[in-house]
Image: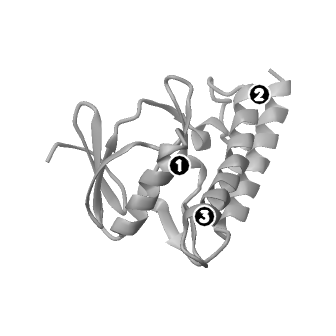
């Protein structure tokens, strides 16, 4: 195993030169969801390239050079404005968040079994990141799951959080 890079409450991440290995303590990612992810990621370049599925609890992915998460970029008023935040980036994030929902539904209608939907089940703002190349990416690939629900119900609260923080940040940018 490579060098331990980061430990969260649910996962450990191991890093080598260009690969990040994620070992989850509790969040299973079945082989079927992995295969659907590969198919989805083939036509959606905002997905992190997964290089190997080791087990329901371990996967390897391409290491991204992350510049900033959307969560960090859209900090609350109690913090200084993030130096990377611009109106253009905020517009890109809002459009991106809505577009990925459309992409999930279109893909599900075309490829998922009858009565199933395929989407990212953990779309909080820390899982949306800008790379150092200024690409907007959706991370945490093992949160893509096949489900019987047409919409991730948490999407509404995450979208509201995004829109509120985007609005507040845009207002703060007017004063800069």
| Residue in the picture at 39% in, 60% down | 34
Task: Quickly name the residue at label 3.
Answer: 108
Q: Earlier in the sequence, mark 2 or mark 3?
A: 2
Point out the residue furthest to the front here: 110
Which image quadrant for residue 63?
top left
What element does badge 1 sit on? helix
Residue count near mark 2 (Cα–Cα under 10 Å), binned few <14, some 14–19, many ≥20? few
Q: Nearer the viewer, mark 3 or mark 1?
A: 3
Residue at mark 2 to residue at mark 1: CA–CA distance: 20 Å
Task: Quickly name the residue at label 1.
Answer: 127
Assign the C terminus to one quadrant of the image.
Answer: top right
Determine whether label 2 and label 1 are within 8 Å by CB.
no
What element does badge 3 sit on? helix
Q: How far from the left and from the top, in percent, is residue 22?
A: 30, 53
Q: Earlier in the sequence, mark 2 or mark 1?
A: 2
Vertical comparison of 46 with 38: above or below: above
- The figure's colour scheme reads one colour
Point out the residue furthest to the left here: 1
Vertical comparison of 87 with 156: above or below: above
Residue at mark 3 to residue at mark 1: CA–CA distance: 21 Å
Q: Nearer the viewer, mark 2 or mark 3?
A: 3
Residue at mark 2 to residue at mark 3: CA–CA distance: 32 Å
Q: In the picture provided, is 155 more to the left or to the right than 20?
A: right
Q: How far from the left and from the top, in percent, is residue 8?
A: 36, 56
Q: Earlier in the sequence, mark 3 or mark 1?
A: 3
| Residue in the picture at 72% in, 25% down | 86
Which image quadrant for residue 130?
top right
User: Can residue 69 be seen?
Assistant: yes
Task: Quickly name the residue at label 2.
Answer: 87
Residue closest to the eye, 159 or 136: 136
Residue count near mark 3 (Cα–Cα under 10 Å), binned few <14, some 14–19, many ≥20? many
């Amino acid at each position: 195993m490579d060098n331990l890079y980061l430990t969260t409450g649910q996962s450990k991440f191991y890093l080598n030169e260009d690969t990040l290995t994620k070992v989850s303590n509790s969040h299973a990612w079945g082989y079927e969801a992995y295969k659907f992810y590969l198919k989805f990621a083939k036509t959606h370049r905002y997905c992190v390239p997964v290089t190997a599925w080791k087990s329901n609890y371990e996967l390897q992915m391409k290491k991204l050079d992350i510049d900033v998460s959307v969560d960090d970029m859209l900090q609350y008023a109690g913090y200084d404005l993030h130096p990377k935040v611009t109106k253009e980036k905020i517009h890109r994030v809002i459009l991106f968040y809505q577009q990925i929902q459309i992409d999930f539904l279109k893909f599900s209608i075309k490829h998922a079994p009858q009565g199933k939907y395929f989407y990212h089940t953990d779309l909080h703002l820390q899982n949306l990141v800008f790379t150092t190349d200024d690409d907007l990416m959706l991370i945490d690939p093992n949160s893509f799951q096949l489900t019987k629900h047409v919409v991730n119900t948490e999407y509404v609260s995450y979208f509201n959080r995004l829109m509120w923080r985007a609005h507040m940040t845009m207002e703060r940018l007017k004063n800069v």
